[in-house]
Amino acid sequence: MKVLIVDDELDVEQLYRQRFRKEIKAGELNMMFAFSANQAMEFIAQLAPMDIVLVLSDINMPGLTGFDLLKFIREKYSHLKVVMVSAYGDPDNMNKASSLGASGFLVKPIDFTILKEKIFNLK
Amino acid sequence: MEENISIDFLIKVLRKVFLFQNLPDHLVKKLSESILIKDFASNAVIINKGDEGNTMFVIISGKVKIHDGKEQVAEISEGNFFGEMSLLDDEPRSMSVTAVEKTSVAIIHRNDFFNVLNDFPAISKNIITQLTRQLRTQNTVLIEQLRSREKELNDLVDKRTAELATRNSQLTHALEDLQRSQQQLIQQEKLASLGQLTAGIAHEIKNPLNFVNNFSQLSLEILEELKETTDETEKNEILNDIKSNLEKINNHGKRADSIVKNMLNHSRTRNDEKQPTDLNKLCDEFLNLAYNGMFANNPDFSCFISANYSPDIPKVKVFSQDISRVLINLFNNSMYAVNKRKKTGELSYKPSVEVNTSILNSDVVIEIIDNGTGIPKEMVDKIFEPFFTTKPAGEGTGLGLSLSYDIITQSHNGKISVESELGKFTKFTIIIPTT
Ligand SMILES: [Mg+2]
């Protein structure tokens, strides 16, 4: 299964790849990374969208935010699940995420045990 | 001659006049026959200064004052005479004469007077004596007036000096008060801009701390995997990962450290010396802080940031805390402006803030351009004035830009200017000399 991770911090790639090393090696998981909302939109549009099952997106990014990406996905790719990830776990942000149609909200630093559950529950 | 005054009476009056004391009887009689009598009410003007004069006057009854405008030279009564000067020198009247009370005068015409003078030249001595007396009296009066004038002036000078001293000490107090409140305001503005930053700073620190936590936790876990595995390739792979993770921990630790340092710098009172500073780095750090701060306070906020830093900029000696206050101020303003315009719901609006640095004639030029709400033309000129703000009450101290202006122009010998078009853009240009 394919997961697209969107965050403006480049180091998240190393973090996720190591965290899910076993799963990636075993071919259970395919991870893609985009470092801005724009880049994520391009990926989603270019790749066979059916491949991706989950988008994990940061909210606070220069240019378009994670909310802009969430709106874009909800409008055009309604089958895609989006989980928002942010250092701001305040009610405003969470309410906005759910009202825009996010499937979940994770507060940084990410609890990877919960994240793993979320991903594999999708199967 | 009026009928009710007899010649005898006039002769008596004339006899009393010093001028005519020695005059033989027949001449006094002759003179009294040609005299005109005239009555003046109190305050009536008898002679106007500057008038032509061919008569002299003898006071029969009453009192007159001799004066020049408001300056009184003498007050004379019955038996005295006046107006003789013009008679002698043919010049216009040198003083005015006004009745102080109801006054009756005998008027002697020039021709009659000179006839008497011809018949009795000894009268000249009387005239000279009288004139000398008058001159002496007038002199004394004038000197007295001068003295009292001088005293008045001295008193006035003393009074004014005392007033000035009081005023001066009031002003000194006011100035001290002003300086004190200015210091307080500067401190408030510092705290306010720090307040705006706090959310951004918290986020900026939280991100690297998250990485430190994640990477160290991760390293602990894969160390366990290392113990378990026997595969050499996998062992190497894990060791490389751990090494790389430790590097990440180190980097993000330093990142958090530098943010805390900056924050302390910002709130601390200024160093006494300017330090060589990388202005590009300073711009970038505070651009990030402003962006994150804005986002933390407005979850809806988003904006495109474009930063073009010239690699040719040398380190410049500046008070970096002060410059960073200017930057954070301008960044906050520009982001506030794009956010405000975005809220108007304008279709296809793409909020963006652009930061450019360049070098021009050995000056560093920093441009901060936003496509926000812009500033009305009539306000552009006032924008650097203290307490001027376009923000609603409570959202700005109105001091940010005026302090920024002082920091750039006074502490750094530089320039700060603004260009704007309402509803289109605002561009701030800062010029800091490198030498
Ligand atoms: Mg982010």
Image (cartoon, coloured by chain):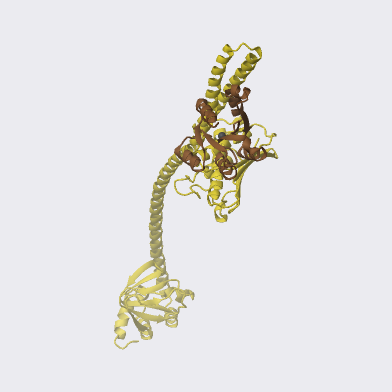
Q: Which chain is brown?
A: A
Q: Which chain is yellow?
A: B
Q: How many marks?
A: 0
Please tell me whether residue B165 is drawn above or below residue B27 in the rendered image. Answer: above
Which quadrant of the figure shows ligand 1? top right
Q: Position of residue B377 (x, y in %)?
A: 57, 55
Judge whether residue B297 can be spotted in this image: no
Name the quarter where the C terminus of chain B is drawn: top right
Judge whether residue B347 can be spotted in this image: yes
Q: Position of residue B261 (x, y in %)?
A: 53, 28
Front position in the image: B240 or B266 = B240
Front position in the image: B180 or B219 = B219
Q: Residue A4 sits in which quadrant?
A: top right
Name the quarter where the N terminus of chain B is drawn: bottom left
Q: Position of residue B422 (x, y in %)?
A: 58, 54
Front position in the image: B99 or B222 = B222
Residue at 45% x, 48% y is B393
Please tell me whether residue B294 is drawn above or below residue B96 in the rendered image. Answer: above
Q: Position of residue B156 (x, y in %)?
A: 39, 54
On screen, residue B76 versus residue B323, left or right, reads left
Residue that sits furthest to the front in the current view: A123
Front position in the image: B38 or B399 = B399
On screen, residue B114 versus residue B219, left or right, reads left
Residue at 53% x, 35% y is A83
